[in-house]
Image (cartoon, coloured by chain):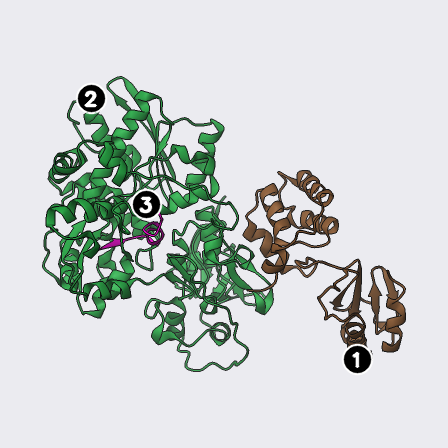
Chain colours: A green, B brown
């Protein structure tokens, strides 16, 4: 394919054939307002906000779906274009609730931003407004279809990126509604609860289930000892909520901010990420030596777990039996830590800060009560933590860094990289290699499993035994990889899967505005944070060593089995979620 | 929630012969692209309507997400998620038929059958469908029963026409 040259607002620009007028304009330095458009994911021209005037064309054209052509002369700011754009926006808003002040997306709403930018001061059209019930059926995601503008970004991301298709467009005309299949509650369809739909929603139609109230209540309850754990991916994303450059590492400031909120102890999920490596690494070695089910697949990502339970229930034996680091933490906080600190576990309230909406579901799973109580009491997304901090006027980027509390706050670089695609694999390899070969790694960097490619493969030589590994991120890629394994087209011993594109740093609980560029910047932050730590291998974590000596005994031992391992539940593919 | 879910949960009226036919139709289309609409069309002809169970069977059989099947079924007026009667009574509400009294004909049909447009009688004998212009404006108001066309129909003839069908 060749190039085409066109003129946009008097500027000449040359772009590859097939480029949309909207993208060509961006290259020419002309920003055309748009709403439903989401590069590479949702390019359907449904909202008509991006209309432009093309000389010689009778009607205005949606620039996001109009291919640039040689000699085309485009105008983006004529009276006709401005009037059409305003009319389109007014029509959309005429069927939108005026709840901006109390909406969770106030301040981060693309419709609000556009209305402001276009100077909309009144709505000329008055008519019927769609009325649908709010869907609060899941522990993770809330759907408020009345705030939906039918842009279909959520439908596209769920289908094209995640390969789940939990959402679709139902009905026709004014009755159109984005909904789960058959207009069932979201909890009754095969949804991974990954929250990628929430990340791309331009309005407040999709959001996380808010747990800030429960956390405020616990923090205010003098009888509760409230501890918090932070997932690796939070430290490279929280800053964005306060205007920091994407990828900024704000670990210490985040700790300070959590203390400012009133948490009794600020711990780190990295501690149990390291622990996961010891349990999972030994599980892999056991499966390899005893002829267990291979390939073994990681089990840290609860969206991935729900996905495989729905779509590949016959492959559950491939999953590592290890709980996720979040759940290992909860189980230990209410046993090991409770004992050590002399606190009755019933008085301990465990909060997790997670980049994830599916974690909210995970902590409510019936298996996750090994301590005798719900092991993790509440999960906050990065966004919810930011909201709580804004409420008390604490901007972490302005705070002096502080240290995590010991011992559950001690982690290595291997744990930090759990936040990025390939990180769990790399952390496991760092440990498995040294355990098997009894040799020290010359370089701890397994770069083959890093990066943004959908499916990555590598071979690792463990003193003569070659272990074939694969890494997939995003459930669409996970599906491809599983199909390859199922058909025998590919063969591995160990697979890492994370539900979200880029891994946890691109999770459904991360700041609104998450896109590929930001994901890459956060991944860079993750590897920088790893490099900066003195310890970069999980088996060198002194707190984890002490945990085994004082409490667990050995990896895969009886206590580990009881507290740190779990089982899975085959679920229906279509609906009736039980 | 709208149509579809509650009715179709209790679609226990589909016979095993009909299910076999559904599977046969799905098998015929399986693996081809862009065949969801013709497949659903044939399945609806075999079963009479497309309750959720049937949509699920089609989705699983063709390996198409249920959300997509449901989307197509609820978009096209051709598809119905509620049972359709043995005889389809259509009343044209195109402009010409309407001004010539199509609405009065519809009212009468609804009165005689005891159901509203879009519904099916309990004995599954009749259902009523409102049609947009069927291109027979000179004959308006037009009523159809299956493939029979009744031109310049008057409300007081409706009962007599319907009585012919059993």
Have a look at marks 2 and 3 and say if they share a chain: yes
* On screen, residue A293 above or below B89: above
Q: Residue at x 9, y 59 (%)?
A: A400
Residues behind callouts 3 and 1 on a single chain: no
Residue A219: image location, x then y, percent: 19, 64
Chain of the residue that carries numbered disc 3 in the rendered image: A
- Of badges 2 and 3, the one in the foreground is 2
Depth check: give the residue in front, A551 or B40.
A551
- Image coordinates for residue B156, horizontal then vertical, percent: 88, 77
Mark 2, chain letter?
A
Q: Are marks 2 and 3 in contact (CB under 8 Å)?
A: no
Q: Look at the image and say whether residue A358 sits in the magenta stretch.
A: yes
The answer to whether A58 is drawn above or below residue A353 in the figure is below
Q: x, y percentage for residue B3?
A: 61, 63
x, y percentage for residue A571? 47, 44
Q: Give the labeled residue for mark 3.
A: A503
Q: Is residue A247 left or right of residue B133?
A: left
**CA–CA distance in space, label 1 to label 2:** 89 Å
Residue lying at the far top of the rendered structure: A464
Residue A35 within the segment the image draws in magenta: no
Q: Which residue is mark 2?
A: A437
Q: Which residues are magenta?
A: A349-367
Tell if the residue under mark 1 belongs to the same chain as the one under mark 2.
no
Q: Which residue is mark 1?
A: B99
Residue A295 visible at all: yes
Residue A364 in the figure: left or right of residue A539: right
Q: Secondary structure at mark 1?
A: helix
């Amino acid at each position: 394919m060749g190039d085409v040259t066109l003129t946009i607002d008097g500027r000449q620009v040359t772009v590859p054939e097939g480029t949309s007028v909207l993208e060509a304009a961006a290259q020419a330095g002309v920003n055309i307002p748009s709403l439903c458009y989401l590069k590479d994911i949702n390019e359907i021209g449904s909202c008509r906000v991006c209309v432009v005037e093309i000389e010689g064309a009778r009607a205005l054209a949606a620039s996001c779906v109009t291919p640039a052509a040689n000699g085309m002369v485009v105008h983006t700011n004529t009276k006709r274009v401005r009037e059409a754009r305003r009319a389109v926006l007014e029509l959309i808003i005429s069927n939108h609730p005026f709840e901006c002040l109390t909406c969770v997306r106030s301040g981060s709403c693309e419709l609000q931003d556009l209305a402001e930018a276009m100077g909309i001061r009144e709505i000329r059209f008055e008519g019927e407004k769609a009325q649908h019930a709010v869907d609060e059926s899941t522990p993770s995601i809330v759907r408020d279809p009345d705030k939906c503008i039918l842009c279909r970004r959520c439908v596209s991301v769920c289908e094209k990126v995640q390969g789940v298709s939990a959402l679709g467009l139902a009905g026709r005309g004014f009755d159109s509604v984005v909904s789960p299949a058959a207009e069932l509650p979201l909890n009754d369809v095969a949804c991974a609860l990954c929250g990628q739909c929430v990340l791309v929603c331009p309005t407040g139609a999709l959001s996380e289930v808010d747990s800030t109230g429960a956390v405020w209540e616990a923090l205010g309850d003098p009888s509760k000892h409230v501890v918090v754990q932070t997932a690796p991916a939070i430290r490279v994303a929280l800053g964005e909520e306060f205007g920091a450059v994407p990828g900024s590492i704000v670990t210490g400031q985040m700790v300070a901010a959590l203390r400012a909120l009133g948490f009794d102890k600020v711990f780190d999920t990295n501690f149990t990420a390291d622990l996961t490596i010891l349990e999972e690494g030994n599980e892999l070695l056991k499966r390899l030596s005893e002829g267990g089910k291979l390939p073994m697949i990681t089990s840290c990502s609860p969206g991935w777990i729900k996905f495989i339970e729905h779509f590949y229930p016959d492959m559950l034996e491939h999953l590592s039996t290890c709980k996720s680091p979040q759940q290992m933490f909860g189980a230990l906080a209410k046993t090991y830590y409770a004992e050590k600190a002399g606190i009755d576990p019933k008085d301990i309230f465990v909060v997790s800060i997670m980049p994830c909406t599916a974690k909210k579901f995970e902590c409510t799973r019936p298996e996750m009560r090994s301590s005798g109580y719900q092991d993790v009491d509440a999960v906050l997304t990065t966004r919810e933590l930011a909201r709580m901090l804004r409420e008390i006027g604490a901007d972490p980027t302005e705070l002096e860094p502080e240290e995590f509390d010991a011992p559950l706050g001690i982690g290595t670089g291997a744990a930090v990289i759990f936040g990025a695609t390939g990180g769990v694999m790399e952390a496991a390899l760092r440990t498995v290699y040294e355990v098997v070969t009894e040799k020290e790694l010359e370089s701890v960097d397994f770069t083959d499993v890093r990066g943004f490619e959908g499916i990555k493969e590598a071979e690792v030589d463990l003193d003569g035994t070659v272990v074939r590994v694969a890494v997939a991120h995003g459930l669409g890629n996970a599906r491809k990889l599983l199909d390859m394994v199922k058909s025998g087209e590919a063969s591995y011993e160990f697979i890492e899967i994370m539900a979200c594109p880029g891994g946890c740093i691109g999770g459904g609980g991360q700041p609104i505005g998450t896109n590929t560029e930001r994901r890459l910047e956060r991944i860079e932050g993750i590897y920088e944070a790893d490099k900066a730590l003195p310890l970069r291998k999980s088996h060198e974590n002194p707190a984890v060593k002490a945990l085994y000596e004082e409490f667990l005994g050995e990896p895969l031992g009886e206590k580990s089995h009881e507290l740190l391992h779990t089982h899975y539940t085959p679920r229906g593919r279509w609906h009736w979620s039980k | 929630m709208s149509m579809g879910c509650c009715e179709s949960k209790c679609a226990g009226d589909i016979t095993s012969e009909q299910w076999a036919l559904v599977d046969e139709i799905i098998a015929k289309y399986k693996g081809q692209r862009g065949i969801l609409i013709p497949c659903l069309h044939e399945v609806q002809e075999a079963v009479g309507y497309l309750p959720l169970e049937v949509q699920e069977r089609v989705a699983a059989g063709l390996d198409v997400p249920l959300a997509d099947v449901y989307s197509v079924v609820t978009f096209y007026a051709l598809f119905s998620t509620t049972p359709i009667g043995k005889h389809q009574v259509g009343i044209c509400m195109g402009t010409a038929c309407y001004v010539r009294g199509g609405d009065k004909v519809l009212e009468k049909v609804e009165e005689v059958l005891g159901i509203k447009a879009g519904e099916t009688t309990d004995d599954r004998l009749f259902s009523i469908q409102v049609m947009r212009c069927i291109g027979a404006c000179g004959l308006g108001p037009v009523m159809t029963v299956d493939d029979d066309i009744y031109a310049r129909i008057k409300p007081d003839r409706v009962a007599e026409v319907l009585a012919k069908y059993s």
